[in-house]
Every structure is written in C-alpha cells, then in structure tokens.
Image (cartoon, rainbow, N blue to C red):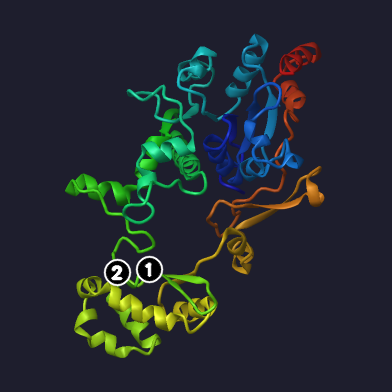
C-alpha cells in the first residue's frame, strides 16, 4: 500500500511549481483531481515549439501522469459550487493563483474551512501571501534573478546566468510537497488542518542555504568559483581528458588527495611542500592543475571515471542530459517510469522521472498517463451529485 492511498487532492495549480508538488503526492499514491480553466486548460499542455505534442507537451507529461482532469469555469456560480463540493471531499487543496484570487472566487482558506475543517490548504506563489512583494508577478527565471541565484554560477566577472532548467519551480514544488506531508502528519496527531504559504522566493533562499548563510554569518558574499568547488581546491575542478571529454573531480579531503596522487603515480606530491596541505594546494593551484591536466589527457574520460571511483576518488564524467538519462544504472534504480500515452508521436511509449527515492516496499510510481483536458469532467460531476442537466450546464460553461 502506498503511503498516500486514500488521500485526495483538489489541485487548482497550473504551469510547474504547483503541479510538481501534486505530482510528487500522486507518485506516493494520492488521488489528484486537476481543475483546469476553460478552453485549453493548463498552459503547460502547449509548452514548447513542437505542435505535434499540443495538449500533451513533454513538460506537461513530466508532472501530470496519473492525475484526473475536470474543466471548470470558476467565474460560473454552478462551477464554483462544483469546486466547493470537490474540496469538501478532499484532504488537500493546492493552488498557485496570484494572492487573493482564490478568496475572490469564494475558495480562500476561511471559506474552505467551513466546507472541511481539517483541510490542508497549500498556496504557492512568487513572493508569498504577505509582505511588500506579495503582488509582484513571478515565474521561474524572475525568481532566479531576484533571489540572487543567477549571481552564483560562472567565473568572477561573468554576467549573471540563468540555471538551464526551471530549478525554482521544481524546488518550490518539492518544498510544497514536503510541507503538505508535514501538515498531514500533524493532522493525524491533532485532527487539525493547516494553511501553508509557500513562496518561490523563500524556497529558493532556503535551497541556497550553503551560499546565503555564509553571507549572513560573515557579511561577505561568497566568491564565484566557476567549475571549481566552493572548497577552492584545485583538485575539485574540471579537466579535459584524452578523448576530448571532461571530467569533474571533487578531491577535497587529505585522504582523497593522497589516493589521487597514488592513482596518478605521483606519490611525491604527498610530501611536496607546495601540495602538503589544503592551504598550500590552494596557494599553488596553477602548478598542481597543470601537472594534473597533462596526466589526465593520457586516458579517456570514462576510464578515469571508472578507475577513480573504484579508488574512492570523487570523479564524474561530464555528460549531457541524453547521456545521463540513458545510463543503465537508472533502470535498475527505477528512476524512470514507462508510460503509454495514446495519440503521441512515435507510438506514445514514453518515460518520466520518478520521485528520486525508493522505499523497500510500495515505491513511488504511477502507471496511468496524464489526463486529456477535461477528460474526467462528467464522471467527477456525477460523483459530486450533479444531475444530468446540471452537468451539461457546467460543462457548457467551460467551453
């Protein structure tokens, strides 16, 4: 039995952060009913430039597998009543409208508490439900900018650079899922629900604790180090190998440096005053890296990765996403979940990424494809006790 079997989520979220949170809950067994707006539904259904995937864009598939979809026009009173009935039969509400929108619809937390006193209600927004930035619009790259995240990568003097995937959306969704699980656990103990306020800005700063806290403690911002680790060690950097590919080393401990010297057949480095300690290696970084670079160009990247890893030396070949996603290791670890999605190009057999952890039993997984837009509307309305004529009117309002 999966841990969230029997838990129902009324999901009013769209795009990425909220849907990623409910995706994680779905992987743990929750029933997720996705409430979509009239016409085309979640904009992520059409994300990207390949129109062959319209309605089931890859980014949408990534975070919506196994959910159900009901199309509701929340400006229509009967449709709002449907939303109220859905919430009354749910354990969790997730929404990521701009602050105040759900309240104006009559679906804010005080309204929902009257429908179900122990509801766990999670609002996801750019800057939170309070504070001077509350009403600022935000998407992933905006918060990458305002949180300082863009300033952390690259070498000193480089222009700020966006992380190359929607990291803020993903980490915010994970933060929301974590908060929801904590609130559910407390509800088991106290019988009380909770109002959760998750801000992309707040979640980003928490995610960047290793960069933010040193500034808070010392008053000095950490320097950008490019492809060298924050340790500043010349042995925690990137090197070109014999086949032109790159490896990234993470040699930061004395024992690791000694193991590296043995493996590279440079045992004399261990007694060399220039390389004797971490501080002396930093002071003589250019000389040490020049020696290492000459040696590492003698063998291909995959060989170095294998030999160093076997010797307990942190080393990884720099792969692109296609190479990383094709590693046989991932299949054994159930990192990828196979799905069949009718109507997609190439037969519809695809894979999505799992939750990133395993249980001994009943691991996170999903077997059903993402829902077509509004595909469960009539079934859900019937379950919510709307008669045939009422269902027809609600469905017409959403077209």
Q: Please indicate whether residue 81 sits to the left or right of residue 190 in the image.
A: right
Q: Please indicate whether residue 62 sits to the left or right of residue 375 in the image.
A: left
Occupied quadrant, residue 230: bottom left
List x then y, in percent, for residue 85.
Answer: 63, 19
Residue 4 seen: no
| Residue occupying the point 22% across, 85% down | 272
> Which residue appears farthest toward the top when viewing the image?
77
Q: Which numbered marker is on residue 374?
A: none
Q: What residue did someone put label 1 on?
A: 237
Q: Please indicate whether residue 84 sits to the left or right of residue 154 in the image.
A: right
Within 10 Å of disc 1 (Cα), the crowding (few <14, some 14-19, many 20+) is many
Contact, mark 1 vs mark 2 (Cβ under 8 Å): yes
Residue 353 seen: yes
| Residue occupying the point 40% across, 76% down | 313
Which element carries disc 1, helix, strand or loop? loop
Q: CA distance from mark 1 to mark 2?
A: 8 Å
| Residue occupying the point 34% across, 63% down | 229
148 to 103, vertically: above or below: below
Within 10 Å of disc 2 (Cα), the crowding (few <14, some 14-19, many 20+) is many
Occupied quadrant, residue 397: top right
Q: Quadrant of the C terminus?
A: top right
Which element carries disc 2, helix, strand or loop? loop
> Which one is nearer the viewer's eye here, 88 or 21?
21
List x then y, in percent, for residue 82.
Answer: 65, 17
173 to 374, vertically: above or below: below
Q: What residue did someone put label 2 on?
A: 233
List x then y, in percent, for residue 215.
Answer: 23, 47
| Residue occupying the point 29% across, 73% down | 286
List x then y, in percent, for residue 72.
Answer: 67, 20
């Amino acid at each position: 039995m999966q841990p969230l079997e029997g838990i129902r989520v009324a999901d009013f979220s769209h795009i990425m952060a909220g849907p990623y949170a409910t995706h994680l809950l779905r992987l743990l067994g929750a029933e997720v009913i996705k409430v979509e707006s009239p016409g085309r539904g979640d904009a992520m259904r059409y994300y990207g430039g390949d129109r062959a995937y319209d309605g089931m864009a890859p980014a949408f598939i990534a975070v919506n597998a196994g959910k159900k979809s009901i199309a509701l026009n929340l400006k229509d009173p009967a449709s709002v009543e449907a939303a109220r009935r859905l919430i009354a039969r749910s354990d969790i509400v997730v929404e990521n409208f701009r602050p105040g929108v759900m309240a104006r619809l009559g679906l804010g937390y005080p309204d929902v508490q009257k429908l179900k006193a122990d509801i766990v209600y999670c609002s996801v927004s750019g800057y939170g439900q309070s504070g001077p930035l509350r009403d600022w619009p935000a998407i992933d790259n905006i918060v990458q900018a305002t949180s300082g995240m863009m300033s952390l990568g690259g070498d000193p003097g480089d222009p700020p650079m966006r992380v190359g995937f929607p990291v803020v959306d993903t980490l915010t969704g994970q933060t929301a899922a974590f908060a929801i699980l904590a609130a559910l656990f407390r509800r088991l103990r106290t019988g009380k629900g909770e109002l959760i306020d998750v801000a992309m800005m707040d979640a980003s700063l928490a995610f960047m604790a290793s960069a933010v806290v040193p500034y808070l403690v010392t008053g000095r911002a950490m320097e950008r180090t490019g492809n060298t680790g924050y340790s500043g060690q010349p042995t925690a950097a990137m090197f070109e190998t014999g086949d032109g590919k790159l490896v990234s080393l993470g040699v930061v401990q004395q024992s690791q440096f000694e193991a590296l010297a043995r493996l590279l057949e440079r045992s004399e480095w261990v007694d060399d005053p220039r390389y004797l300690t971490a501080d002396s290696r930093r002071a003589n970084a250019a000389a040490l890296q020049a020696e290492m670079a000459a040696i590492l160009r003698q063998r291909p990247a995959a060989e170095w990765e294998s030999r160093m890893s076997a010797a307990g030396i942190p080393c990884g070949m720099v792969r692109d996403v296609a190479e990383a996603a094709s590693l046989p290791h991932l299949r054994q670890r159930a990192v990828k979940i196979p799905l069949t999605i009718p109507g997609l190009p190439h037969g519809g057999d695809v894979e999505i990424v799992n939750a990133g952890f395993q249980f001994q039993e009943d691991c996170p997984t999903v077997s059903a494809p993402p829902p077509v837009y509004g595909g469960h509307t009539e079934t859900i309305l019937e379950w919510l006790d709307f008669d045939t004529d009422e269902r027809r009117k609600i469905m017409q309002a959403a077209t």
